[in-house]
Image (spheres, grey):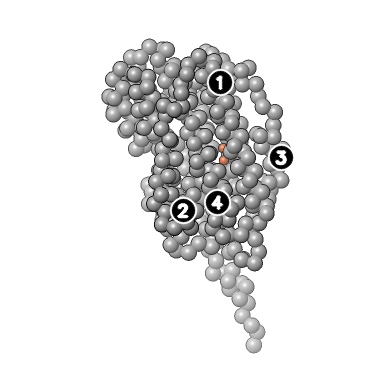
Amino acid sequence: MAEPDTTSLRAQLRPPSLPRHDPTEPAESSVIRALTRSWGIRATVKKREPDLDDLFDPDRLDFPEVLIPFHTHRRYRDLDERRRARLRAWAWIAYNKNVVDIEQCVVNPGFASVTDDALGIGPHDTIVLGVMQAMVDEQYHTLMHHNASALTRRRRGWVLPESVLPPSRTVRAHREAVARAASPRAEALVRLAFTTVAETSISAYLGLLTEDESLQPVNRATVALHRRDELCHSSLAAELLKIVFADLGRTDRRVLLDALADGIVAFTGGDAATWAAIVEHERIPGGKELIADAVAAAESGRVVQDCSAIRSLCTELGVADDLHLDW
Ligand SMILES: [Fe+2]
Ligand SMILES: [Fe+2]
């Protein structure tokens, strides 16, 4: 009697699009291999740096009015143009700080847990290479956003010290989730989840500033260059999650999904604490009312509306309905 074909039986039992990880073979990915091969010609860090001073136009807005959570509030409309311009410059400084905080405190530590193999996936050299290239990109993005803030301070002649600002909302939520993790393995899953959310959603956050023609050209250029890299990081992060997810047990999956939901809520929401610090520092008349009326209300809504990348990733994994989240 012919032996049953166990290979095809096993293949039928697997969930669709989730290749099982063979422990004798280091995990690989053709998507990540292609990304590593193109890095040298596509990454912003490999390109000539634009002259930021040349791109600065003092007559353009440093930040879109519509993205200031209280731009329609009477207290804001009553301010003179100089004070509104300072608040827009602050918004740009805070936006940059948010990006830098996420890259330094969330994404690169999350990537490091992959290169250190904290989850025991045994990544192929190509995967480690792809992740290390992305970590170099993130370090360069941090420099780009730092330079953009420094240019704004210098050309406007305003101090606008970042020490006024609290850690950003995503970083606060990340710290809390890491602190709640019940084991080093759970902590590694939380780090991977927040990194995945950041890397699949940051293009949408950067996209908020690339379409506005009235915006400061140097700010648009900074964000557009960063965004080009992030469209590739989104594919990298999605592949990493798929590789890890395929081998997780039920408990690990729950930890990961809860952390993904926490990450999405924090990443897409507003940040009342940051705006409260800015308004207090600027001694805006009626500042407390402004925060209570407009900013706190906006925090429960979404700044980043487009969650399509992380949502389709969760749908592909068959878990979109398992996240405790109102998509
Ligand atoms: Fe980045
Ligand atoms: Fe990235």
- Mark 1 and mark 2: Cα distance apart in space: 37 Å
Residue 82 sits in quarter:
top left
**Picture residue at 61% right of the left edge, 66% below the top:** 23
Closer to the camera, 38 or 113? 113
Q: Are marks 3 and 4 in contact (CB under 8 Å)?
A: no
Q: Nearer the viewer, mark 2 or mark 3?
A: 2
Residue to which mark 3 is pinned: 40
- Say few, some or many: other residues with alpha carbon within 10 Å of mark 2 (under 14 / 14 to 19 / 20 or more): many
**Label located before the other in sequence (2 or 3):** 3
**Label located before the other in sequence (1 or 2):** 1
Q: Quadrant of the N terminus?
A: bottom right
| Relative image position of residue 97 (x, y in whole percent) | 49, 31
Residue to which mark 1 is pinned: 151
> In this rendering, would 231 be left or right of 158?
right
Amino acid under disc 1: Leu
- Mark 2 and mark 3: Cα distance apart in space: 33 Å
Amino acid under disc 2: Glu
- Mark 3 and mark 4: Cα distance apart in space: 24 Å
Residue to which mark 2 is pinned: 187
Closer to the camera, 125 or 206? 125
- Say few, some or many: other residues with alpha carbon within 10 Å of mark 1 (under 14 / 14 to 19 / 20 or more): some
Amino acid under disc 4: Ser
